[in-house]
Amino acid sequence: MQNDSPENRWFHLCMEDDLATPNAFVTTRVGAVPLVAQNIKGRVVAFRNVCTHRFAVIHGEPAGCGPLRCPYHGWSFDADGVPVGLPFNPTDFQLEAEGRRRLALHPASLARCGRLVFVRVATEGPSLEEELGSGTFARLAALSDAFPRRGDAAEPAHDWERIEAANLRLHLAPDGALVLHSAAPAGADSRFSRTVTLYPITADAELPA
């Protein structure tokens, strides 16, 4: 892989609260690689969204709530990616602990910037802060923390402040609305693009400069 290939880049996936519920998941695709971030018993982890047994896609929807379970043979996986639920294992698969570990899901990278969740195919490389730059990273974190409430969709106007980072475009209104648009990564179709409008807790809340 080249250093500038999509697999080595961070992509904004969702908001932290999208993964706050046990079994909540959000998926995307980077090039030919499907990815999933999932809450498994309170731990949020990211993997390639492909079962290591017969290579079926595990979660086919962009987002939802359900166990990390392959639809092909019903294998389910724990927060380390190890298959822990194998229907008919004694008769069909006969996998002991070591065999299960060898069939663990391939991990992906996950990072947070404030309440923003980012993923990357590659498991090694520059941190999210290094890729975005410390100034942009701090600004995104402050804005995401200052706008905790989801609300009605707003259409950005020409005088709104605009910030671009990774696949994310933020539009900040002078009167206190924040529109986040995440473009689908390279190779992903439009169903993996996401837009959310956020507001401060109160109209007179102090916002970051």
Image: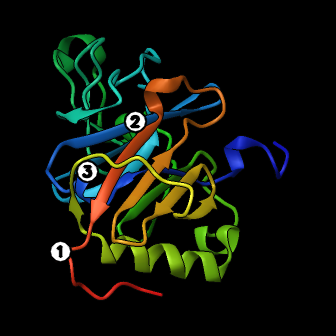
Residue picked out by circle 2: 27
Q: Which mark is residue 23?
A: none
Task: Identify whether 177 is placed above or below 101.
Answer: below
Q: Secondary structure at mark 3?
A: helix
Q: Secondary structure at mark 1?
A: loop
Marks 3, 1: nearer the viewer: 1
Q: Amino acid at mark 2?
A: Thr
Instruction: Give the mark nearer the N terminus: 3 vs 1.
Output: 3
Q: Is residue 184 visible?
A: yes
* Residue under the image location 49 percent in, 72 percent down: 140
Q: Looking at the image, how many numbered discs can be counted on the residues?
A: 3
| Along the line of sight, the residue nearer the viewer: 120 or 74 | 120
Q: Amino acid at mark 1?
A: Ile
Spatial CA distance of label 2 from label 1 is 28 Å
Picture quarter containing residue 41?
Answer: bottom left
Q: Residues within 10 Å of mark 3 (few under 14, many from 20)?
A: some
Which x, y percent locates residue 147?
Answer: 30, 70
Picture quarter containing residue 174?
Answer: bottom left
Which x, y percent locates residue 142?
Answer: 42, 80
For residue 22, side relative to residue 130 (left or right): left
For residue 84, side relative to residue 170 (left or right): left
Residue picked out by circle 3: 18
| Along the line of sight, the residue nearer the viewer: 91 or 31 | 31
Q: Residues within 10 Å of mark 1 (few under 14, many from 20)?
A: few
* Residue under the image location 16 percent in, 15 percent down: 88
* Residue under the image location 60 percent in, 49 percent down: 167
Q: Amino acid at mark 3?
A: Asp
Task: Identify whether 156 is placed above or below 93.
Answer: below
Instruction: Give the mark nearer the N terminus: 2 vs 3.
Output: 3
